[in-house]
Amino acid sequence: MFSIGEMAKIHHVSTKTLRHYDDLGLLKPIWVNADNGYRYYSTEQFEQLNTIQYLKDMGFSLKTIKDHFDHRSIDRMISMLEAQKASTEQKIQELQNIQLRFQHRLDDLHAATKVTAGELGVVQLKTMGDRPIVRLMEDIQSEYEIELSLRKLENLSRLHSSIFIGGVGLTVDQQALRQGDSSTYNSIFLYLEKETAPNELITHFPAGTYATLLYRGEHEQASRHYKTLFEYLRENNLHLAGDAIERTIVDHYISHDENDHLTEIQLPVHESPIYRT
């Protein structure tokens, strides 16, 4: 027989852990000295402890492990492992999505540090692919309303707030823009790495040509840059094809220096004169 200290040393666990297993009825000593309360274990229990540690390392709770020992069978073991494998695969997918979001955010910030003065306030035409988003249609007119709408979008989409960092943007109604009003937003959105939100909230920014412009500042300074964009559209016989997209890439939560702040406006455009701007 082995004392609790020897058992702990052999299996690289603490005596506190072995006492906890005893209290749970998961691994009880083979003998307890009635005079001093010392616990003793046998070599027959080595494999049981190894199995407990194996299942614990695989992510099983101690309650599940005890249930297995109380009702063990090959079918139960297969069922346990299959369920845990599925859970692990889901966690891997979640971590891969987080990793992808990290990378996209890093790409944004690295690109922001390389923007030159010559690129600011200059309109560029870009071809963009289809982009899945989760979107909440709602009139928004202030920073206060932006934050409230963001919390509402988080709750409705059942997405954790941590994934909202860097991927949030606002849209301006195309009809309002044609009338010269760029100050009121008609929705708040979040770019999705994967369509994991409720289907009724998922939509897409369609693939197509976008007139884009970068400027130093946040949403409050957007108005004059819309004028630059619409002048470009008129000069190049382009016409607005949908709501404007605004996304602040670097804001005051990222940098105290206002010279670092960076926002991008995207206008979907087409050449067919369906609407006059």
Image (cartoon, rainbow, N blue to C red):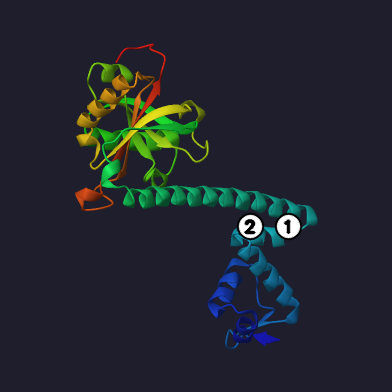
Tell me, yes or no, if residue 262 can be seen here: no
**Residue 224 place in picture, x, y as percent:** 20, 30
* Residue at the extreme bottom of the image, as rendered: 35
In terms of secondary structure, where does tag 2 sit?
Answer: helix
Mark 1 = which residue?
A: 71
Are circles 2 and 1 on residues that touch, CB within 8 Å? no
Quarter of the rendering containing residue 149: top left
Tell me, yes or no, if residue 42 can be seen here: yes
Seen at 60% across and 72% down, the residue is 22
Mark 2 = which residue?
A: 64
Q: Amino acid at mark 1?
A: His
Seen at 29% across and 19% down, the residue is 234
On screen, residue 10 above or below 53? below
Q: Quadrant of the N terminus?
A: bottom right
Q: Earlier in the sequence, mark 2 or mark 1?
A: 2
On screen, residue 224 above or below 74? above
In-front residue for pair 156/2: 156
In-front residue for pair 49/242: 242
Quarter of the rendering containing residue 133: top left
| Circle 2 crowding by C-alpha within 10 Å: few under 14, some 14–19, many from 20 | few
On screen, residue 206 above or below 191? above
In-front residue for pair 72/220: 220
Seen at 74% across and 56% down, the residue is 77
Q: Is residue 271 left or right of residue 53?
A: left
